[in-house]
Structures are given as structure tokens and as C-alpha cells.
Amino acid sequence: MKVVKFGGSSLASATQLQKVFQIVKEDPTRKFVVVSAPGKRSADDIKVTDLLISYYNRYLNNENTEAIIKKIVNRYEGILDELSIKKDVLVDIQQAIQQLSTLQRENNPHLFDAFLASGEDNNAKLVAAFFSQNGLKATYKNPLDLGLIVSDEPGNARILASSHNKINQHKNTDEVLVIPGFFGYTEQGDICTFSRGGSDITGSIVAAGVEAEIYENFTDVNGIFVAHPGVIHEPRTIEELTYREMRELAYAGFAVLHDEALMPAYRANIPVVIKNTNNPQCKGTLITTSRKVKHEPVVGIASDQGFASIYISKYLMNRELGFGRRLLQIFEELGLSYEHMPSGIDDISIILRERQLSQDIEEELLERMTLELKPDELRITHGLSMLMVVGEGMRQRIGVMADSTSALAKNNINLEMINQGSSEVSIMFGIREEQEEKAIQALYETFFNN
Ligand code: ASP
């Protein structure tokens, strides 16, 4: 059986919901349907989750909430009307949204999560009612009844291992279970959400729990592109990639799936497919444990901006016992996490996200490094972009590095850093942010367009 998850744009309007219904109906093995809250209908629209944040802020500040409640209810009502769904669901939804403003306001660490979660919770009720009314045996299933128990970390919940067996008990359901994404319940019975975009995580957890044959994640693109469509005109989509390749691409900005969403499916060895609600015939992109590497060593090119690099050089660094530990201790004590650490014999670079560096922190960091490590040279470079060439195939193919560097050199792109991960799934280049687009285009030409 399959677990399907639909994102906010797939549930934003009645037209979209009709498509969702067809998709679920045409395959009787699609038994678990995880839904997001209604998303944007157009570029300048507001997601229901974001409306709920406004509602929460107003409530917290003791401001009038009537207008915002109306706006939220209207989003559901518009969809219900167009689909001619019976009015009792609307009454239910209206009450649930209204009731949020009766929750304890002070000293309530779960209040924000309760507001946010209601976006998906009410949508699951709506979707279940729509399916049932159209002859599909479907029920709304609350995460508590499903057994989705999470850690008590508001806004950043983690699944608890005990959930697995509880969810597993639902695997032989004969009706379609419509499950709200994005949140679970703590052992004390409080609502806790995952981080933003977390309905993807719910889908993956449910897929692992019920041992699904596949986790289908429906969104609004035909699959994962080999490079960013904002930089490359109509890039190809990737047919198949491994979890590891996906992880590397996601790291550098491929944001189709939530970062944490792959883990539960990966551990349970369940393939994930990214599909398009607006074009369900399209095969989409399949993510699996292993794939047959065909001719191409590279599956995708990604990049992400906002990095800084700190370069330290000291003669005989390689023999100085404890140098690395003392260096990283300074980072740890300043609360800085680093991303990469390429090193040579007498030098080392630490790459980190520069949003962590306020002026004060940066000054303190450099001062402490100078005092405690006594380097011969120490410098910091801002405004770097990490460019990643990703593909399991490069392990068996000589020349990916050479092809990449020569393409970049031909385009006058200066390499500030090169790092090939130990796993040999990716090669990373640190370049200046201004050269990022040109670099992606050069690599795309080399690996995908000849
Ligand atoms: N609705 C939530 C958000 O906007 C969760 C999700 O859509 O996955 O973050």
C-alpha cells in the first residue's frame, strides 16, 4: 500500500482538490493521505499557516481577532462551497478556529503550535468529508489516534521510537485515512509541530510506520530538476537518485522536500517519489537506496550562498598536538557550528554560514584564534557560495573533477576552495557569490548539455 502526501499548493482550491481526489481514487492502494494546510492560490496569496501566525500574534497581544478569524474560515468556506460539501464540516472548522482563542495565553509553550497545527488539522477534516461525499470510503485520522507521538520540543518536534508500532497497527485499514501533516502529540498530550514545511516529515513517518511500498509526495513540479530553473532555462528533471544524492542536493538549496523528511523512509528502506498533482501521469523523481548508474556520473548541480571561510595557516601545524581540538573549541564556545573543514599540511579552512557571525562574534572569534592558536596567517572571506556537483557515479568515473574545474576555469571562475567529501558522492567548490550563476551554467553545459 502507498502513503501519499499533498502539499499546500495541491490543496489551495477546489480545482486542486478535484485533482487530488482523482489521484487517490484511481489507485486503491493509496490508503494513507497526508495533507498540508491550504497553500497559496497565486504568487501574492497568503498560506493558511501564515494567516494562523497573524491570528496567534493578535491573540497574544490581546488585539481584536474577529477579522483574521473570518479570513481563515473564509479560505475553508470558499473551498467547501465550490465543492458543495455539507455545511456541518464548516461548522466544525469554524468552531475549531474560534476555540484557539480560548486556549491559555500565558505560560503556554504549546500555544503557537496549537494555532499552526490547526491549518492542517481542519484541512484533513475537509478533505475526508469531500472524499466521503464523493463515494470514497475515507475518514479523518487525528495524529493522536494514529499514534504519532513526538518529543516535547515546540516548533521542532522529533518522532519518538514508540510511535512506530502504534502507527503500524493501522496498516490494514480498509478505508482511506486522511491525516493532517506537520504535527504530533507529546506523551503528555500536547500538540507539537515539526519545523516549517513539516508535513513532508509526517508522510515519511507514516510510510515507515505502515511499511508502505512507496511514499508518494505530490507537489507542483514534475520532479527534481538537475539544476535550479531560475538559472537554467527548462532544466531536465532527474529520473532517479539515491537518498545520499538527495541529501547533498538538499543541503545546497534543492528545497523540494523538507530536510528531515527522508530519514524515516530511508531507515525503513521505503522509496520516495516526488510527483506533480497537476501532471500525475509524469513519472516524477524516484529516490531510493541505490540506483543503477547509467552513463552520467552526475545527477545534479546545486549551490547555496551565504558562507564565510576562515583560513588559518601555521608552520608545522600537522605536528602540533591538539591544534584542531583547540580550534573547534573556540567555535563551540562561541556557539558557532561549522559546515566544512578542508585542510592541508600547515593550513586549514573552516567554512560556516555567515548569518551566525555578528560583528561582535566575528571580532571575538578572530581575537581568540589569534591569542590561543598563534597562527602565522589568519583571514576571513565573506560572500562565498558553495557549488556542489553531485552523483554516486563519480566514484566509478575518473575525470569528473577535471571536467568540472576545466569548465569553471574556461569561464574565469576563481575557486576559493575545493572539497571532495569522503563519501565521493559530491564535489564542492567555494566560489564568489557573484560568479554563482555563471558557474552553474558552465557545469550544466558540461554534464547535461552535450
Ligand atoms: N503548513 C505548514 C507550513 O507552511 C507545514 C507544511 O506545509 O508542510 O510550514
Image (cartoon, helix red, strand yellow):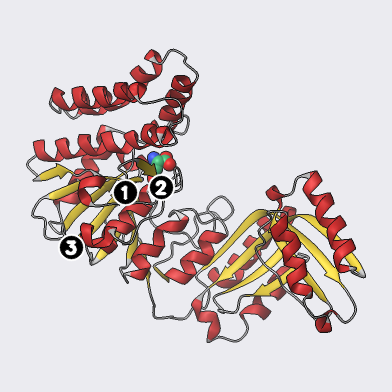
Asked whether the residues under the numbered discs 1 and 2 touch, taking CB atoms below 8 Å apart as contact, a structural biologist would say yes
Element type at mark 2: loop
Question: In the picture, which quadrant includes the N terminus?
Answer: bottom left
Asked whether the residues under the numbered discs 3 and 2 touch, taking CB atoms below 8 Å apart as contact, a structural biologist would say no
Q: Cβ of disc 2 within 8 Å of ligand 1?
A: no
Q: Is residue 441 left or right of residue 410?
A: left
Q: Amino acid at mark 3?
A: Met
Q: Is residue 450 visible?
A: no
Q: Amino acid at mark 1?
A: Glu
Label 2 sits on residue: 152
The structure residue drawn at horizontal position 24% and vertical position 46%, both measured from the top left corner, is: 144
Q: Is residue 109 above or below residue 174?
A: above
Q: CA distance from mark 3 to mark 2?
A: 31 Å
Q: Nearer the viewer, mark 3 or mark 1?
A: 1
The structure residue drawn at horizontal position 21% and vertical position 58%, both measured from the top left corner, is: 166
Q: Is residue 218 visible?
A: yes
Q: Nearer the viewer, residue 142 or 301?
A: 142
Q: Is residue 294 left or right of residue 229?
A: left
Label 1 sits on residue: 187
In this rendering, the count of numbered labels is 3
Label located before the other in sequence (3 or 1): 3
Question: In the picture, which quadrant includes the C terminus?
Answer: bottom right
Residue 31: x percent and y percent?
17, 54
Q: CA distance from mark 3 to mark 1?
A: 29 Å
Specify the quarter for ligand 1: top left
The structure residue drawn at horizontal position 26% and vertical position 64%, both measured from the top left corner, is: 214
Residue 274: x percent and y percent?
36, 58
Residue 401 lies in quadrant: bottom right
Q: Which mark is residue 1?
A: 3
Residue 84: x percent and y percent?
15, 27
